[in-house]
Image (tube, grey):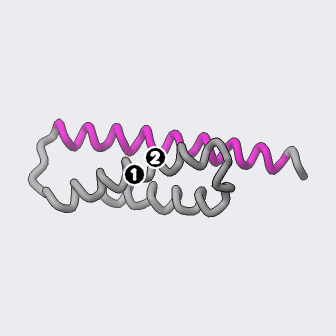
Amino acid sequence: MLTVEALAGLHEGERLLDELPPLHPDHETVRLVMIDLLRLYESMTVRRDETRMVLTSNAATIASARAVLDQVRARIEESNSRLA
């Protein structure tokens, strides 16, 4: 269900923001993705009679957001492994 995926993305974004220093280059990237996911989640929970085209667009937004979050997570893990 897309609302569950959007919430999962928001939770992952929150975890990343907690790990990233505010001035880290990816902090703003994650924050902007979270704004997109929050708007998406709000639109899905307010209007339940969405069309297939809107749902497809929402799925693409979630997939894109999750890809960005995964890339940031990978960069953090790579950076941490180099420091260890």
Camera-side residue of 35 and 40? 35
Q: Main secondary structure of the magenta part?
A: helix
Position of the N terminus, as image quadrant, is bottom left
Q: Which disc number belongs to residue 10?
A: none
User: Which residue is drawn at the image coordinates 38% and 55% (left, top)?
Assistant: 5
Q: Position of residue 71 (x, y in %)?
A: 60, 40
Secondary element at tag 2: helix
Camera-side residue of 81 and 23? 23
> Which amino acid type is marked by label 2?
Leu
Q: Position of residue 84 (x, y in %)?
A: 90, 52
Camera-side residue of 17 and 2? 17
User: Which residue is drawn at the image coordinates 80% and 50% (left, top)?
Assistant: 80
Residue interval drawn in magenta: 53-81
Query: Which quadrant of the view contains residue 58?
Result: top left
**Left or right side of 8 for 69:** right
Whether 2 is among the magenta residues is: no
Secondary element at tag 1: helix
User: Which residue is drawn at the image coordinates 83% and 48% (left, top)?
Assistant: 81
